[in-house]
Image: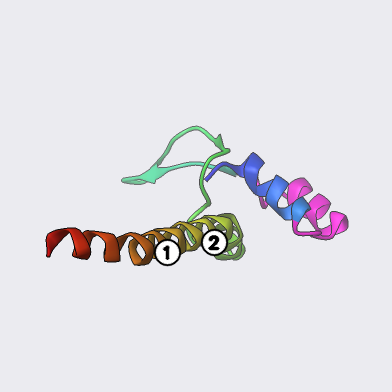
Amino acid sequence: MNNYALIIKLINRKFAIQLLTIFLSYGLVFFVTCVKLNGHVNYVFSLIVGVRQGGVLSSLFCAIFIDQLVDKVIIILKCLWLLYIHCMPQYIFLCQ
């Protein structure tokens, strides 16, 4: 998930600019994180793609991001179903 695209989607959904400003200023959209493995912590890095696991808002951000994707898949499936319904009688006729 591209976090820049997430911000654009939040703006397009008329998300309150004040909340978006708070999210950006506290690092709730662009996460700064590190990895801890066997007691050793690596350097801190910025996570600009994806959502941080276990974050309170991570599931909300993920749902907002994939919402349009689900809508597009539904539209494609409806189009394919209509194509199937309209083209299928012709194939049945040709097979007889």
Camera-side residue: 77 or 12?
77
Q: Residue at x 50, y 60 (%)?
A: 75
- Local packing at callout 1 (Cα closer than 10 Å; few below 14, some 14-19, many 20+) is few
Q: Amino acid at mark 2?
A: Asp
Instruction: Return the x and y of residue 82 as percentages of the image width and height.
Output: 42, 64
Camera-side residue: 25 or 14?
14
The residue carrying mark 2 is 71
What's the magenta region? 13-31
Ranked by sequence position, the earlier of labels 2 and 1 is: 2
Q: In this view of the protein, can residue 27 be seen by the observer?
A: no
Camera-side residue: 29 or 35?
29
In screen coordinates, is 17 left or right of 5?
right
Instruction: Return the x and y of residue 10 as percentages of the image width and height.
Output: 72, 54
The residue carrying mark 1 is 82
Using the rendered view, name the quadrant where residue 22 is placed: bottom right
In screen coordinates, is 14 left or right of 71?
right
Q: Amino acid at mark 1?
A: Leu
Asked if residue 78 lies in the magenta stretch, the reply is: no
> Which residue reaches farthest right?
18
Q: Secondary structure at mark 1?
A: helix
Quarter containing the C terminus: bottom left
Camera-side residue: 84 or 95?
95
Q: CA distance from mark 2 to mark 1?
A: 17 Å
